Image (tube, rainbow, N blue to C red):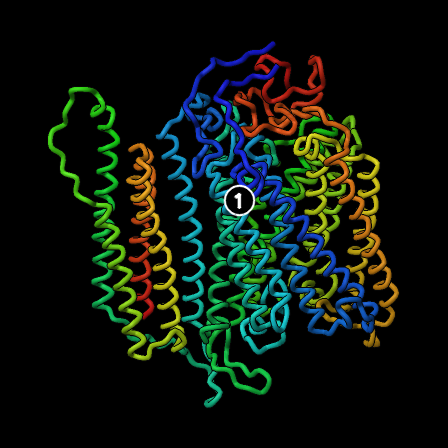
Amino acid sequence: MSTLAPKLAVKDPRIGEGGGTPPSFGGGGGGNSGGSGAFDYGERLRRARLGLVLGLTAVIMLFVGFTSALLVRKGLPSFDAQTNTYSRDWVTVYLPWTLLVINTAVLLISSVTMELARRAIIRKAALAPVKSIPGVSLGEETNFPWLGSTVVLGLGFLVGQFLVYHILQERHIFVNRGPSSSFAYLLFGTHAVHLAGGVIALMYAACTSWLLHKPVEAQRIAIDVTAWYWHFMALLWMYIMVLLVLVR
Amino acid sequence: MATSEVVHAHAAPQGFIRKYIFSLDHKVIGLQYFFLALTAVWVGMILSLLMRIHLIWPGANIPLIGHIQPETYLSLLTMHGTIMVFFVLTTAPQGGFGNYFLPIQIGAPDMAFPVLNMLSFWTTFVAFVVMLAAFFVTGGAPLHGWTGYPPLSAIQSSGPGEGLGADLWITSIAIFCAASLMGALNFITTTLDLRAKGMTLFRMPLTVWSWFITAILGLLAFGVLLSAGILLLMDRNLGTSFFLPTIVVNGQLMGHKGGSPLLWQHLFWFFGHPEVYIAILPGMGVASQVLSTFSRKPIFGYRAMVYAMLAIGFLGFMVWGHHMFMSGMSPYSAFAFSLLTMGIGVPSAIKTFNWLGTIHKGRVRFYTPMLFAVGFVSLFVSGGLSGPFLAQPTLDIPLHDTAFVVGHFHLIMGVAAIFGIFAATYYWFPKMFGRMMNENMGKIHFWFTFIGTYCIFMPMHYLGMAGQPRRYSQFTEVAYLHHLIPLNRFLTYAAIVTISAQLVFVINLFWSMFKGQKATDNPWEATTLEWTTATPPPHDNFGGHTPVVNHGPYEYGVPGAARDFVMQTDPAGSPAH
């Protein structure tokens, strides 16, 4: 009666270990490899990317909420008790655009360095099997610290945003000055928190790679997912900039 | 014999902390969610009991609490609703049973991201602790209801409980949002990426479909609630004016200007209405699973059931405005929301028809899970039928702030979903704990709960139509409501009896855990993957094998088969429909 399928030995799929993701068993046979149970970094990468896309969907919904609130709030009439009339109270506040443009440039450059780091690790992962062959040399390789550069630039952006906050405080543009400044603080702050999360993820990926000597494929997954998150943060920042320009 | 593939078996983690506290095993995490919800439901029930007692004996001096003040009543109401919606109806069916059984039912060894899964539970736990902390701070728990409408919720001085208590309430909700998003992400990835060989989308049990669709709703809805919560916290603590217009509180002009409480309502109900389906969809999945198993018939219209759930989920995002007919809305918008809301009746009716079609001419086995599944259908119909009434602005406006709405949403969202949880508990208990629950106690529990909940919530429709307002702490002094006192007294007695009957469930649960009759691997003669593995399932779910799926999930009453069911892993040549 039993119709056991071919027996396949697999490497440790890391169930129950800290941070491990389970092995894939196929996805219903609907186009996936299905059933091998092999410890496949390609499948883990795909799964991590899917998780990231879903996580970013949640972030998008957060900003959809903020955006709809902004658009509604901007259009609302406000009651003036002194004149007994309704008027719109949306007064565009001063924002240090020069510094914001510099911050934007820093973030976009960091996105480029992040992409270069991602491509470098892909190349490293692809060449790893070749390098492991005795007697095979790939010649001199330059290992520019793209990842470290991204962390530095990311921190630079956050410092720049702190300077924006400082300038606004100096000019007495506080969070409760009016709806325009409230939304600026809200959008800058929420983006900064998310970007800080990306910086921490990058530092974590770098530290665990060096300290725990993770396989290059495992490093690749961490860096790849963080890179796409980073690019999304740059895109989100551009969206915030455009939104703030449009509602001025 | 079942088909499967051999994989490397894994040793379970050793040590109490790794095994039971910070476990990465989805089954342990599922049980953690289940027991968290069990704790929460008792807190919520006791709060509701206090409210019912206060309504008919407003002068009663309750031990440890004393005399319930009007503002205390509002705190009870707020915390009852919040705890029940978030920490019971969202937590138990999805976090509890979804976590435990989704990976097993699709043939996976665990969730896609075990660490995230553990974080999700502990974040939910922290949210619950923060929520309960609101009871014990100065001013006590907030008064603004589970919907948190401004301006009451947005001003610290608007009442006792609206200070630190309200901040804790909002913070707890925000933490819960983060936890739910982590959970939703994990559920969707697991379903899409970890299905066993042969487990195509249309071979997934309807329970898996329901958890999957619920996760999608959660992913899209909780982010918006989080955004609203952040804005509310800013209004309360940073002096912004997102939700607050110019307003005078206790004779004092506040510094806010230009905001709109309606903005909160839009953001809240964009989350709030899908939340209704987040609570009820898993119950629909469980009811389908149980009705098919115990009727010994395939589910009637499997694909229609899937499409109906997808339609309910989709339409659920289009109808938030029907909660706001009373708040002020363009009649054109109200018409659109009204039409779309009544549209949800179509997929709901398809589901109900298919459940009845499944039972029709079945060889029904009336075990306790089946009773609760039938009870679910009954309550879903009874609670759902008042939906089209409230979907029409002209009817909603006189009924909206009355007990009619309380009766409606308790039947459809509260009790029906709870019946789904009970059906799931009785159905899967043997698999989770390796023992059977006591049938006699289960049946006693069912009949008391079924009749009791109808006695509590059906008369509320009449009370509402007779004009009894909801959220009012005291009505006995109001002349035009005097004739409703006897019926209200009956409701309170029914609540006391029904809540007492839940002790039978708890005793049965814990007694059976240790002393119940030993369960076989497949005591219900069911077909899905969880019944192909050992009881309770091993650490990696299938003990070194991964199942290969050859059949659909509900192949019962198969002509020509040696037995009246074909398990999903039976060889492909097995007789099937």
Give the secondary structure at mark 1: helix
Q: Position of residue A244 (x, y in %)?
A: 32, 66
Q: Residue at x 71, y 24 (%)?
A: B520
**Residue B4 image position (x, y, % from top left):** 54, 18
The one nearer the camera, B459 or B99, is B99
Q: Which residue is mark 1?
A: B215
Q: Position of residue A7 (x, y in %)?
A: 47, 14
Image-quadrant location for residue B82: bottom right
B24 lies left or right of B339: left
Front residue of this view, candidates B386 and B49:
B49
Classify residue A93 as left or right of residue B351.
left
* Residue furthest front as drawn: B15
Left or right, B194 with respect to A237, comes to: right
Give the residue furthest to the top.
A1
Q: Toward the viewer: A48 or A15?
A: A15
Q: Name the quadrant of the C terminus of chain A.
A: bottom left
Q: Residue at x 55, y 41 (%)?
A: B17
Q: Residue at position x 44%, y 31% from top?
A: A14
